[in-house]
Image (cartoon, coloured by chain):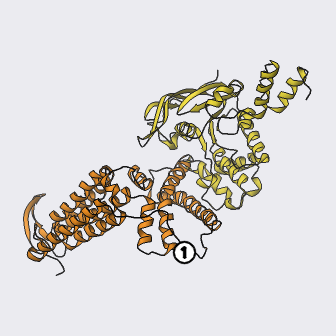
Chain colours: A orange, B yellow
Amino acid sequence: MSTLGSRLLRTTIIGKDTPIHKLDPRTKFLYFFWISLLGYIFYDFVLTFIFLVVNLLLAVVGKVVRRILLTILVIIVPWIAIAAPILSLPLGFPWNETIIYRINLFGMELPVYQEGLGWAITWPLRIAVTISAALLFMLTTKLGEIIALFFKLRLPFRALYMIAAALQFIPLLADEVGTIYQAQLSRGLKTKASIVRRVFNFLALGIPLTLSAISKVQIRAIALESRGFSAPVEKTLMYELRFKSVDYVFFAAIIFFTGVLAYIYITMGYSPIVRLRYLFG
Amino acid sequence: MSGEPLIRVEDVWFSYDNEVTALRGVSLTITKGERIALIGQNGGGKTTLAKHLNGLLKPTKGRVLVKGMDTRTTPTHELVRYVGYVFQNPAHQIFTSRVYDEVAYGPKNLGLSEEEVDKRVRRALEMVGLQDYVEWHPYDLNFGQMKLLTIASILSMDPEIYVLDEPTSGQDHRWRNLVAELIMKLNQQGKTIIVITHDMKFVARTSERTILLANGKILADGPTREVLNNIELLREAAIKPPQITQLCHELNNRLGTSFQSMLEEEAAEEFIKHGINV
């Protein structure tokens, strides 16, 4: 597993004391939905990029920017680098229509289309906005707060426990993968091998991981039942959520910018800066 | 330590994710035919150090040479020809549906012929006493047998050096004895054995050299008898010596004797020699 992937999986929260950490999880969860939705309402890569920058600025305040930035770069840079040249050239994208530039490639003059280029840049940026907002939430919110959030959202307790257990298991399993990988390396597993060999390598990692996860889940289920998990009583949480002044400031900002962006949408449309044509409209 | 040096650990530092420093300037030499115990409190750096010996971990600073090969530049699948590492938890490596296949996985990865693989698998299973379980599903074995299976899966690769991580954890007396006998047998064949363990009685029985690690540093490195009798140092590293050694120490304090036994039979002889009624 890549170092970045394994570090991300291992990290459920980066323990810092910043204004972002102090925000109520409901506020952060609302922000995640709000900014992700905006990314999809507008079809404008400059505006979407601005949303991403806002997320990153908040990540700077929350002192988690390095990890989020690394994840975003790993996902969107290769995506744009591959998609843009393919989609913006002729035959690369079925809706290509508006020529914005001409390039000379191997002695051939080829048109660059706005539709393909816009699509190739906007979609990775939209995904980046969602991922960065989700990571901002996950990396600055304690597991207890997340559980309290879903509890407030009246999620059934069993479903709530499934989420909690999954979040607790992810870092454990990430460590487990590391150890299993090392155990198989010790038996001569070759990482540079043919595709067939790699599939077999996957079995060498996947089977012990699956069995170990099942065993862990079974042990946990027994431990929970032995402490009355299924008892027919009303469940309560030790963690109480309470809005603070910083949450109200954040809400005010969200309401203000919703108003501004609604005005922009009504007066200038879904692509106010780049003026992209909505492809299925 | 007069044999041929097999592993040189030179001023090795290691940090996990540049956050937790697990090794702080560790240096040591391991020579052919040694039986070494790596002891120390949890988080002291034992497993981290051991994982450097076959290149599973690469030093942040310093270097590890295995038979002259730098682990930073030599691929792990090359190093495992010389250093076999038996992991603590059998569930971390067992993935096939037959005991035979599990033991054959390592030698196959080494690119050996089918006949050679078969020969090695049968020899390894015989050495650990699992020759009658060839067709069994590994998960049908009991925990002790699964542990022996993981040892067999490294035995079949026939490395010169064996690193055994907690080979006695979760094992009853019978399986502990089996592992101890296996270690002595391998050592008699000229193999070098490094055992990571919290079981001091096992250390006393199987290791001639003991390395005590705490906070990523070597606190003591010497003959097992000397290290296990350094009660003050062991206390500092939160290690409890074997009960016989504790008894000897208590007697030395009260009677002014100088007993240094680590095993029951040894102690009985010493006590009788000194006229202590046992």
Apparent side of residue A100 relative to residue B157 in the rendered image (left or right) = left
Apparent side of residue A104 relative to residue B255 in the rendered image (left or right) = left
Apparent side of residue A81 relative to residue A209 in the rendered image (left or right) = left
The residue shown at (26%, 56%) is A58
Give the percent coordinates (x, y) of residue B146: 69, 54
Q: How many marks?
A: 1
- Is A156 rendered above or below residue B163? below
The residue shown at (54%, 57%) is A204
Apparent side of residue B78 relative to residue A221 in the rendered image (left or right) = left
Name the image quarter holding residue B196.
top right
> In terms of depth relative to the viewer, which is nearer, A162 or A81?
A162
> In terms of depth relative to the viewer, which is nearer, A79 or B228?
B228
Near mark 1 (Cα within 10 A), the count class, few <14, some 14-19 or many ≥20, is: few
Residue that numbered label 1 is attached to: A234
Q: Residue furthest bottom?
A: A281
At mark 1, the secondary structure is loop
- Is B52 rendered above or below residue B270? below
Q: Name the amino acid type tagged 1.
A: Glu
> In terms of depth relative to the viewer, which is nearer, A88 or A66?
A66
> In terms of depth relative to the viewer, which is nearer, A110 or A275?
A275
The answer to whether residue A171 is visible is yes
Location of the C terminus of chain A by quadrant is: bottom left
Give the percent coordinates (x, y) of residue B66: 53, 32
- Is A235 rendered above or below residue B129? below
Chain under disc 1:
A
